[in-house]
Amino acid sequence: MRLVADSVEVRYPRAARQVLAGADLTVDEGETVAIIGPSGSGKSTLLSVLGGLVRPTGGEVRVEGTDDGPRDVSAWVLQTVNVLPERSVLDNVTLGGLAQGLTRVDAEIDAAARLDAVGLGARLADPVRVLSGGEVQRVVIARALASGRPFILADEPTGQLDRATSAVVLDALFTTAGGAAVVVVTHDSEVAARCGRVARIEDGMVVDA
Amino acid sequence: MTAPGTRARTAITTRARWRARASVSEGLANLRDGALLASVLVAITTAVVAAALLVDVLTAARVLAVERDYLAAGGDLLVAQSAGQQTLDAARCAALADVRGVRSAVAVTVIPGAARLVGRPQSQQTLVTATAGIVDLLDLPTLPVDGVVASTVIADRWQWAPGTRLQLDPTDAGVVRAPRDVLTVTAVRDLALVSDGASTGILMIRPPVGDADQCFVRIDPQYRDDLRATIPAVLGETTTSAVNVSDRLPPGALSQDPAAAYDGRTTRWAGGAAGIVVGLLWAVVAWTRRGRAALYASVGVPYSGGVLIRWTEGSGVVVLGALWGGALAVTAAVAAVHAPVGVALDLVVRGAGLALVVALGLVVLVGLWRPPTLEALKDR
């Protein structure tokens, strides 16, 4: 399966300039790609377009190898907190399995295994609101993986974490992804260095992939 | 792009796998998670629905009370009498009971100061004779052969009650062809309904023969105009003996038409208004919770699954609130303001049903709204 952005253009309403101006990027299942570039260059917008959260005003995004659209094959890890804070760690990750169509029991079994893999096996029953920022991100990563989506799209997943915590989160992201592709938007060169490929974007175009 | 023929073999489909049961479960879990918010919303819904329905019940109860007084005063009575000093045929009057729109008809004759009472000198009693339809008119029990109805004025004066025995002076009774035997007071009623002169009288039933002063006709109000035209003919009006038909109550005796006031009361839509308020409240809540909706979308819950989650949340609050609101309205209407139970139940069931339908309709519409996922996620 392959996620393809083909000459993608995005201009937000009432914006003075195009955020993306013919960006091209191809991500194959199983690879890790970092999207880097200066602030305002269109990194997050490109990721949003790849995941189907933003509709391009020009060009196209397609998923090769399936009838599904980009939104159906993508799972998200965002910089902002994106969990149900009152629910338990296990419940949050179970959502991923339920979204796959698993029964609740099977989804909980799968979620427990995912959480064990990201080092939260002892925190299953804790409500997410008592976790640290790094632990919450690992919950989100486990949930993304539990969803079974072949493309994990991460937007500055360690942007609000200290260096030590970031390392733990990145380990969780890259070592447990299995066959899923991971696309990371980052400013951090160390994060980019852990990816198999780096796509540099400037002025709305991918200049080096 | 993979060739169409190979898609089925290679495709991974994540769409439409989410189970409806999971949506219901998530919706209920979200209500539990936000128990405080859910409780406040249920309480507000309860208060809004109860207040709206209570206003309607009170309005309706006021109209019914006015109507009750109106009918008790003879609001549904027509009175026919011959022009001039002539009398009417009692049998024709009684026969009006068979006419469409007539509930009962009574031929009445009032004889002022007709007879003294045995043992009570200076008691020159007014006698009122009426045909059998008077039983309906005054809501009387079946009168025995020796039974009479005492007016409230006379009953008070002579300390009479049902069961009291009395006798008319035989000489006087003979003159007016009244019974000479001992009579029994069977009921006490305000006879002013028949006429002011009858309010101090003693009423007795007579067969529908001979003449009568007036003919009282209790009608269904919708036939009023037709019957005003029909009654003179039935009573034998001729070109030389006119029959006048008039309302028992003078025009303007009631400031409103009770039936029209009941059907046309604005508050009958109070339940719907309450439903709109509740639905709009839920819309605001849904907007503030758009991040949660976006979260589900980002996790892979399909649109239909998200809609069902939102419907479950909204309907849980609305159904509970409407039921409790209805119960509160009935309780308050009956216990605090003494509204008739039947009226309160009927109106509240209808009103709460309307509120529920309207509010659920808005919940359904609001649930169909899909917030922009990216923006909503950033807002969390």
Image: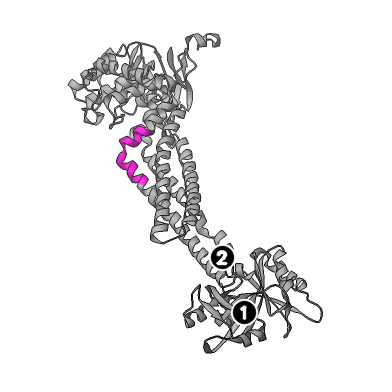
The residues colored magenta run B28-42
* Secondary structure type for disc 2: helix
According to the picture, the residue beneath numbered tag 2 turns out to be B258
Q: Nearer the viewer, residue B22 or A131?
A: B22
- Kindly indicate whether the residue at mark 1 contacts the one at mark 2 (C-beta within 8 angstroms): no
Query: Residue A85 in magenta?
Result: no
Q: Position of residue B215 (x, y in %)?
A: 68, 75
Query: Residue B35 in magenta?
Result: yes
According to the picture, the residue beneath numbered tag 1 turns out to be B128
Classify B137 as above or below B180: above
In the rendered image, the residue lying farthest to the right is: B239
Q: Position of residue B357 (x, y in %)?
A: 50, 44
Secondary structure mainly formed by the magenta segment: helix
- The chain that hosts pointer 1 is B
Classify B209 as above or below B112: above
Q: Is residue A188 left or right of residue B306?
A: left
Q: Position of residue B95 (x, y in %)?
A: 73, 68
Q: Amino acid at mark 2?
A: Pro
- The chain that hosts pointer 2 is B
What is the C-alpha distance between the residues marked 2 and 1?
A: 31 Å
